Image: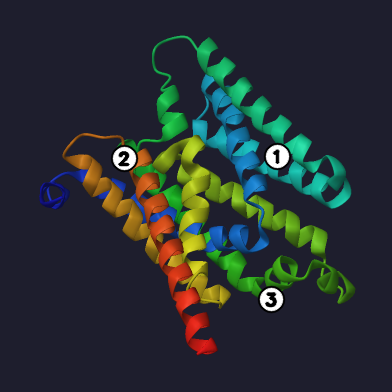
Amino acid sequence: MLEFYQALSQHTFLQTAALAAVLASIGCGVIGTYVVVKRIAFIAGGIAHTVLGGMGAAVYYGFDPLQGAVAAAIVAALIIGWVHLHWQAREDTLISALWAIGMSVGMLYLASTPGDQVDLMGYLFGNILLVPTHSLYLMGAADALLLALVWWYRYAFLAVVFDTETARLRGVPVTFFYLLLLVMIALTVVLLIQVVGLILVLALLTLPAAIAGQYVRSLGRMMLLATLLGILVSHFGLAVSYTPDLPPGPSIVLIAAALYLLSSLLSGYWLKRKVRCGKD
């Protein structure tokens, strides 16, 4: 790990990767908290895997893959949100179908793209070491937009996340804010694509928030702790994977998963101990 931090002060691509990890962690810490509290991880996963279809189409027709990712993510979010609100009986089936269709269409487009420039593994598993500098500006702008929306509509999101029916009775436009939340999840998914890829994005979106939820009850504190955990996990994953030349995306996710399992064991132990002390 010492070798990584020595290289970090010398190589621009590592500095870019470290900054990308921070920007991605902000998005996943804030929006991931909503995903965990609302228990819509499956919906977030459906949005994430549909993105490959948009990326594949963008590459095939000569556009920036991130443009295709944003378009596909937003369309998938709106479709899934509409089905959740109006056709819940078929929600799981539709999400599974969109999941499969998005992955299949994306892989077919990428396979049909002429030349050898298509990096399918990079899209699926990410490569934070290859994040271009201009992507940092896009990630920063997306984070700023997400934070502004979360702050401006914090009470509406709070009502929609915890008690939809009461929010509707009080006149909160639940449909609008629920769809807006899914669109924000879609943007966060795009933020994380270059860090851990499409297949692993759901883990980084939910695990830091799930860990934070074991120790704090305030939504704001949960977001802050989840963001800090995301930064810690992503940088530690970068450091661990650097010397043995391992893929950073899977390394980051494995560390996040190990931390979640350890935290769950410890929190379960302390809860049982607290219950026993209370009985005594």
Q: Label 3 is placed on what type of residue?
A: Tyr
**CB-based contact (under 8 Å), mark 2 and mark 3:** no
Reading the chain from its start, which is encountered first: label 2 or label 3? Answer: 3
Identify the secondary structure beneath mark 2. helix
Tell me the distance, in whole angstroms, between the alpha carbons under discs 2 and 3.
37 Å
- Above or below for 108 versus 8: above
Tell me the distance, in whole angstroms, between the alpha carbons under discs 2 and 1.
29 Å
- Above or below for 165 versus 195: below
Q: Give me the disc on residue 136.
A: none
Please tell me how crowded label 1 is: few (under 14), some (14-19), or many (20+) other residues with Cα within 10 Å: some
Residue at which label 3 appears: 155
Reading the chain from its start, which is encountered first: label 3 or label 1? Answer: 1
Q: Give me the disc on residue 75.
A: 1
Residue 251 in percent (x, y) is at 33, 42
Tell me the distance, in whole angstroms, between the alpha carbons under discs 3 and 1.
26 Å
The answer to whether residue 154 is left or right of residue 13 is right
Residue at left 18%, top 36%?
A: 244
- Above or below for 237 versus 123: below
Q: Nearer the viewer, mark 2 or mark 3?
A: 2
Q: Nearer the viewer, mark 2 or mark 1?
A: 2
Residue at which label 2 appears: 248
